[in-house]
Amino acid sequence: MKTSNPVLTRIGATAQQPHYQGHSYETPIRGQYQPQVAWPGDADVMTIDDVVIKTVSLIGATVLSAALTFALMPDALLGAAWISAAIIGLVLGLAISFAQLTNPVLMFAYAVVEGVLLGAVSKFYESFYDGIVIQAVVATMGTFFVMAALYKMRVIRATPGFMRVVIGLMGGLFVVMLINFAITLFTGSPTILRDGGPIAIGFSLICITVAALMFVVSFRQIEDGVAARLPRKYGWLGAFGILVELVWLYLEMLRFISYFSED
């Protein structure tokens, strides 16, 4: 299945390679194709369990980093930490996505940086809206498990058309949010997309919906990678994709709930 997903492109692209007798395959490395080689042993291939372990480990690192930031970061440094982590996380995320890196060190570095971002943002919101962090966490994890269940039961099917539409929406939203972030950074004021008005509420709902649907895309890409018996290291890309979507969904939930909370 062809996809332009920048996070899991390698998984999907590699999964498309033909399976030859004797379990041989071709693996794209940075856009190049190596000569046919033997399939790796069962211990060296990507599995669902391995992706789950990698995902949980990255989420754990993110949560630990967020908790430490929330507990120890002085209020005066929250803004600087928030902006710095957002920029560093963006650079790391783009590098991992487009260079298709599978280095665990980079994955955990990204997780820690995102944890700093989440911790700083969460502490800021919690200072204005008591209990909002717990609400956002519950809403985020609830959405994730609901989407996982719907995918497992095949209520939502990741068809080629579905994936193209969702990925296209994600790409468009990414560009819009990047421009919005730059405008806010230089003006110091939220735009109409983030000011809490009707348009901002609608925009957040769109972001939440697309973030939730992106889980379905990731689940399908991971399944394709497992079915194609890709090398185990590609499981890091699957775990990274899930983490990116969880972080995005949590931030959108936090913002959306704040629109209806009293300070």
Image (tube, rainbow, N blue to C red):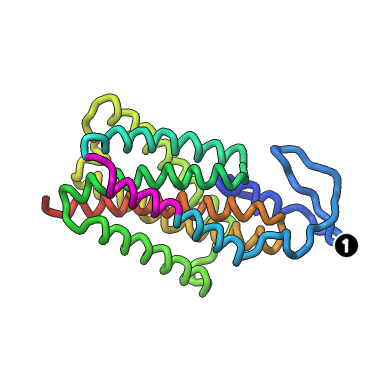
Q: Is residue 65 highlighted in magenta?
A: yes
Query: Percent position (x, y) of residue 130?
Result: 16, 55
Quadrant of res 185: top left
> Residue at point 49% right, 67% down?
156
Query: Percent position (x, y) of residue 208?
Result: 36, 54
Would you name the residue on which mark 1 appears? 22
- Under tag 1, what secondary structure? loop
Q: Viewed as shown, does residue 248 lie left or right of 46?
A: left
- Residue that extends furthest to the top in the rendered view of this protein: 186
Q: Examine the rendering and report whether any part of residue 198 can be seen.
A: yes
Q: Viewed as shown, does residue 188 lie left or right of 66?
A: left
Q: Viewed as shown, does residue 178 lie left or right of 243?
A: left
Q: Nearer the viewer, residue 70 or 135?
A: 70
Q: Nearer the viewer, residue 48 or 17?
A: 48
Q: Viewed as shown, does residue 2 lie left or right of 77?
A: right
In this picture, which residue range is highlighted in magenta? 61-74
Q: Disc 1 marks which amino acid?
A: Gly
Query: Percent position (x, y) of residue 14?
Result: 70, 51
Q: Nearer the viewer, residue 76 or 147?
A: 76
Q: Is residue 97 highlighted in magenta?
A: no
Quadrant of res 235: bottom right
Which quarter shows the N terminus? bottom right
